[in-house]
Amino acid sequence: MNPQAKVIFASSLLLGSTITISSNHWIMAWTGLEINTLAILPLISKSHHPRAIEAATKYFLVQAAASALLLFSSMINAWHTGQWDITQLTCPTSCVILTAAIAMKLGLAPFHFWFPEVLQGCSITTGLLLSTAMKFPPITLLYMTSQSLNPSMLTTMALLSAALGGWMGLNQTQTRKILAFSSISHLGWMAVIIAYSPKLALLNFYLYVVMTAAVFLTLNTIKTLNLATLMTTWAKTPALSAMLMLTLLSLAGLPPLTGFLPKWLIIQELVNQEMAPTATIIALLSLLGLFFYLRLAYCATITLPPHTTNHMKQWYTNKPTSTSVAILVALSITLLPISPMLRTIV
């Protein structure tokens, strides 16, 4: 792709996200989301492969439907209350439609079916954008309207996301699809808590972005798209493969890694809200995700291919790891000790 075109699309993504995040008016928020959608489409379809075109088409149709629902929800609310302010969402019908619209935008179950297919059809770097940056504006809208949303509906969708994200990722062999189902599962953790502690949901999102970015950039560095090629990476980059294993275990939420922090705080908050059964169910459902993270970690570090001397010479590389990968991996592994400070903020 032309470098000038890349700059234009990246600037449009930044502009769209900024407009949505900083707006108080529903029409402005909707405009920002539309700019985002139109800017990411060329990045998804840039390879001109039929799979990429299919992914771009699916993404456009789903996002267009979600944007129409969001606009419909805000119009109903304006009809009932006479105002377009995002924080003044008081009509129950509007709240339900808005929750469905943002769930479609995010890929939250039961509106999750498009997300793994789209992620599988695009490159790893575009997949990283779809999994992190493109989710920030809808999460911000959820944050701003969290007081008006229906907690029962959000909890149901959250448990469904955690269950389907874990269950459907079990038999996958493509790393991008596994990360897509991982994203759906993590969104479930954010959705279950956003009505009770919006700041905690945002903290979960930030830590999820750090860990997912570390995994995507590591996979991009070692050029790995499926489990078969992941098995050969230890011979090429043993240190990076070891760091990938730790980052995956952090995404799974194992102590003493960073990923344990949001899960711990969310379970604690759910218990404080007298929702111990919900906390128990979502914690048990996260074990499904733990299985496929362990599978990825096992393939990256423990499964070794036949390594004759010639193959070792052919595979081994001295290419240095980029600074961004090193920083993100370090953050993904070591942030748990600062949890007391984060607890005071949340």
Image (cartoon, rainbow, N blue to C red):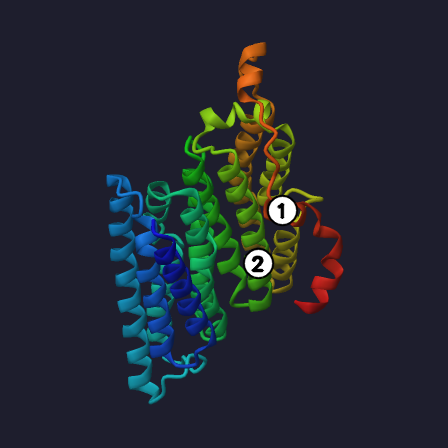
The foreground one among 241 and 315 is 315
Amino acid at the residue labelled 2? Tyr
SS category of the residue bearing label 2: helix
Q: Amino acid at mark 1?
A: Thr
Q: Which residue is mark 2?
A: 206
Q: Nearer the viewer, residue 142 or 268?
A: 142
- Mark 2: give few (<14), some (14-19) or many (20+) Cα within 10 Å: some
Seen from the viewer's position, the closer of residues 346 and 207 is: 207
Alpha carbon distance from label 2 to label 1: 19 Å
Name the residue rendered at 52%, 33% in the picture: 222
Q: Indicate whether 131 appears above or below 147.
A: above
Hey, which residue is sitting farthest bottom in the picture? 82
Quarter of the image containing the C terminus? bottom right
> At which x and y percent is residue 89?
41, 79
Where is 166 relative to 200, above or below?
above
Disc sitting over residue 323 in the figure: 1
Residue, x 39% and y 81% (percent of image)? 25
Q: Which mark is residue 25?
A: none
Residue 334: percent from the left, percent from the top?
71, 48
In the drawing, does residue 262 fall left or right of residue 106? right
Q: Is residue 48 above or below residue 6?
A: above
